[in-house]
Image: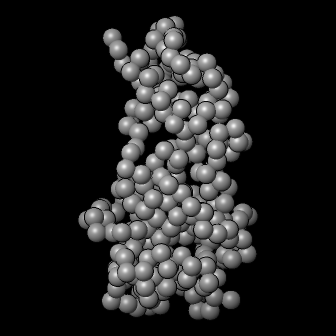
Amino acid sequence: MLGKTDMYAVPKKSLGQNFLKNEEIAIAEAVHGDGKNVLELGPGYGILTKQLTKRARKVVAVEKDGNLYRLLEMEVRSKKLTLINKDFFKASDEELDAKNIDIMISNVPYNLSSKVIDWLLAHSMQAVLCLQKEFVEHMRAECNNQNYSRLSVMSSLCFSMTKIMDVSKGNFYPVPKVDSAVIYIKPKQFRPSEQEREKINLMMQHKNKQIRNALINSHRYLKMEKSEISRRIEGIEGVNQRAYKLTPIQILEIARKVQDALQKE
């Protein structure tokens, strides 16, 4: 089905490898890299990489699997392409030439989705990503939706998001158990502080509880007595609401007030 690629690399479940085999989808992703410096995580058999080298100014592709790296060296030959055989998250910004990258375009292994989003946020980088469809639904979920989560809140606060297309599981080899979706994300100029993100996380971990109770139940993490937490957040507008009913902006506003209240002596 995939020709001689099978001779060089058998998909590894431990690395979450499911390789795109539909060239039309690869082309639809690659057009977003026209004339740009592109970063690709996990090029696999290179179906997207080949399309990127036809359109991008430069492509930096990072492949952890040594067998796939050797395959890519043989199969994708372009002066535009820099191949790196390394764990993406252990590569330095200098190795990735991150300062000069315009966009990440990648079919991301499902088990790395959250880490990739965090990396993009830290580097203020836009991206076109093929992710598990359920993960994308969580990213884009609004309050009062069962998929509404910490990921929804942080994604809404930190990125503008546009879903490009759904991708059925039959477009991958081996066939995964779930469908995928391609999404375009662009970082917003504003982002919550580390302390605000921490409070949002505590609130959304117990999203069905009143925010007051969610924070009190996190007393060990906050290293404060329950009674002290209760006293300090008393009177903050919204703390008696349940987090899943509040918009990301409302949650952020409460997180800021909670942060101020908890850090006062």
Where is residue 60 shown, x and y percent of the image?
Answer: 37, 75
Q: Can residue 195 be seen at all in this image of the molecule? A: yes
Where is residue 87 shown, x and y percent of the image?
Answer: 41, 64
In front of the other: 166 or 90: 166
Q: Can residue 66 be seen at all in this image of the molecule? A: no
Using the rendered view, name the quadrant where residue 80 is placed: bottom left
Where is residue 53 shown, x and y percent of the image?
Answer: 42, 85
- Please, is residue 197 above or below residue 42 in the view? above
Using the rendered view, name the quadrant where residue 222 is placed: top left
Left or right of residue 191, residue 148 in this image: right
Q: Residue at x 58, y 37 (%)?
A: 247
* The C terminus sits in image quarter: top left
Where is residue 215 shown, x and y percent of the image?
Answer: 54, 21
- Please, is residue 251 above or below residue 54 in the view? above
The colour scheme used to paint the residues is one colour
Q: Residue at x 48, y 44 (%)?
A: 157
* The N terminus sits in image quarter: bottom right
Q: Residue at x 58, y 92 (%)?
A: 4
Q: Residue at x 45, y 59 (%)?
A: 186
